[in-house]
Image: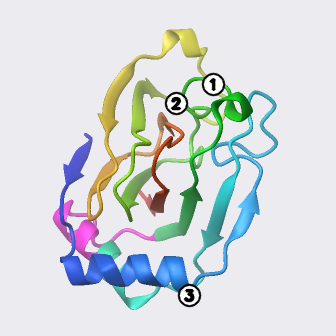
Amino acid sequence: MIKVIDNIINKEEQENIKNFLFNDTQWSMISDVSHKDNKHQRRPGFKKVFHQLHPSIDLLLKETAKKVKKTNETLLEARTFLQLPLNKEYIGTGVDTPHLDRTTPHTVFLYYVTDSDGDTVIYDYKSKDENDIPYFEDVKELKRVKPKQGRVVVFDGLHWHTAEQPTKDIRCIINFNICK
């Protein structure tokens, strides 16, 4: 099940999150947004792991959980990523490296902080255990989601997924991994 929900929270809360992330958050630079020590490509960006949720982000989490009927599950991690448009010669071609956030069963709530041109791509391949890594010529695109402020996409975290590198706009997301 892949569920896309627009305006999961009202516009005022959307703006609160955007203002918090862009004005009051300390980011850490990472060498690649999809895979640590990636040898295939370099897609640098910025990351922040939340140890405590801002009130508007907590509301976002609760509203999403309520909408998809996952209110009793445990939050495993919450983090945010920010990608800037990069020169194509620097990043190479194609999508970011497909990945799993975790190798144990979980659900992903992926919230878009801003409108952007860096789509999220969810593949049909679903891992059965931590050693189940597909050959990428064997995976097919299952769903493509365009980043739109206020939109959240919910999917089984064992589906391999990735993002496209933005070429025009800042791509900023909040990623929640929820115990299944």
Secondary structure of the residue carrying tag 2 is loop
| Residue under label 3 | 24
Q: Give the image location of residue 21, x and y in percent.
A: 50, 77
User: Which badge, 2 or 3, is on the more N-terminal residue?
Assistant: 3
Q: Quadrant of the C terminus?
A: bottom left
Q: Is residue 23 above or below residue 144?
A: below
Label 2 is placed on what type of residue? Ser
Q: Nearer the viewer, residue 140 or 73?
A: 140
User: Magenta part of the protein: which range?
Assistant: 62-74
- Inspect the image, locate mark 1, and give the three-letter code of the amino acid beneath it: Ile
Pick the residue in front: 162 or 180.
Answer: 162
* Residue at mark 1 to residue at mark 2: CA–CA distance: 7 Å
**33 in the magenta segment:** no
* Label 3 CA crowd tier, 10 Å (few <14, some 14–19, many 20+): few
**Circle nearer the viewer, 2 or 3:** 3
Task: Using residue 176 as the reference point, say whether residue 9 is left or right of it.
Answer: left
The single residue placed furthest to the top in the displayed view is 137
Residue sitting at 74 percent across and 62 percent down?
A: 29
